[in-house]
Amino acid sequence: MPITTKTVLAASAAACALIATSLLAATPASAVTSAQTGPEAALAAGAPADAPAYDPSVPAPGPGDLTWSQVPSATSEGATFSAPPVAPAAAGSISTKAVTPISAPNGQRCTIDTGNVYKRKSGGIYPYGAVGGHPTTQCTVIMARISQTTEIYKTVWWGLQKVAGPFNSVNAGQGRLEQTSPIRKCDDLRETTFRMIVRSTGTFPTGSTGTASAYEEAKLPCGTNP
């Protein structure tokens, strides 16, 4: 019996050693797989169902680009900002919906109208044309100051890749600001989904300020590099 016991123990020890060796050998391979897929999975986190498929030829996000996890905090489907009922020199709150503008008690408000993203007539000077828009900020009163910044992006697998902008415009003593400068020439006729993001900030006659952002997108026959 002692001999049998030793044989069983020896066999068990050998089996444990074999399992441990197998686990150690498998660990590096798993680590390599995670390293290859981890960054891709992280960049694609939060992507909408209709986002483009993974494309290794697309450059990694750079300065000014937005990954899908950053997009929701940077844009809204419409925007209105209003002057508070009292007039302290404090920032107004950001409105996330502009379909039905909400007025402050004093009725002072500004609304961003992104307009469409489209193939611009002025792009006829380029072989494949150009895309862009004429975003506008419209206020109910004459403003002390309005500033508007517009950027044009295209949709890629990891988010929004900036292709043009920022286009900055400022005016004073006006109730409306319209930009005609946002434009990006096409490098070919590939179908591309563009998103134009507009951010506006205004100083009301009372001295209070407000800010908001909005976007519009469209799929157009206009490829860009990048």
Image: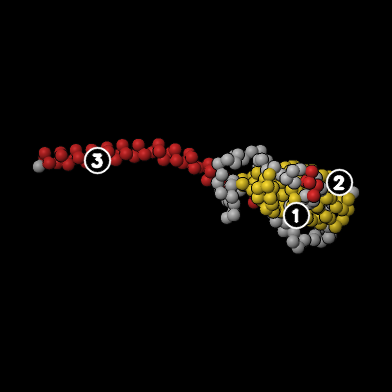
Q: Residue at x 45, y 40 (%)?
A: 33
User: Are the residues tagged 2 and 3 within 8 Å (C-beta)?
Assistant: no
Q: What is the three-letter code of the residue carrying label 2?
A: Asn
Total count of labels: 3
Tell me which numbered mark, 3 or 1, is placed earlier along the sequence.
Answer: 3
Q: Is residue 89 visible?
A: no
- Label at residue 116: 1
Tell me which numbered mark, 2 or 1, is placed earlier along the sequence.
Answer: 1
- Label at residue 220: none
User: Are the residues tagged 2 and 1 within 8 Å (C-beta)?
Assistant: no
Gap in angstroms between the C-alphas marked 2 and 3:
79 Å
Q: Where does residue 169 sit, x and y in percent of width and height?
A: 82, 44
Residue at numbered disc 3? 15
- Residue with the most extreme right position: 173
Q: What is the three-letter code of the residue carrying label 3?
A: Ala
Q: Residue at x 50, y 42 (%)?
A: 38
Q: Secondary structure at mark 2?
A: strand
Q: What is the three-letter code of the residue carrying label 1?
A: Asn
Q: Residue at x 74, y 48 (%)?
A: 131
Q: Nearer the viewer, residue 3 or 191?
A: 191
Gap in angstroms between the C-alphas marked 2 and 1:
23 Å
- Residue with the most extreme bottom position: 100
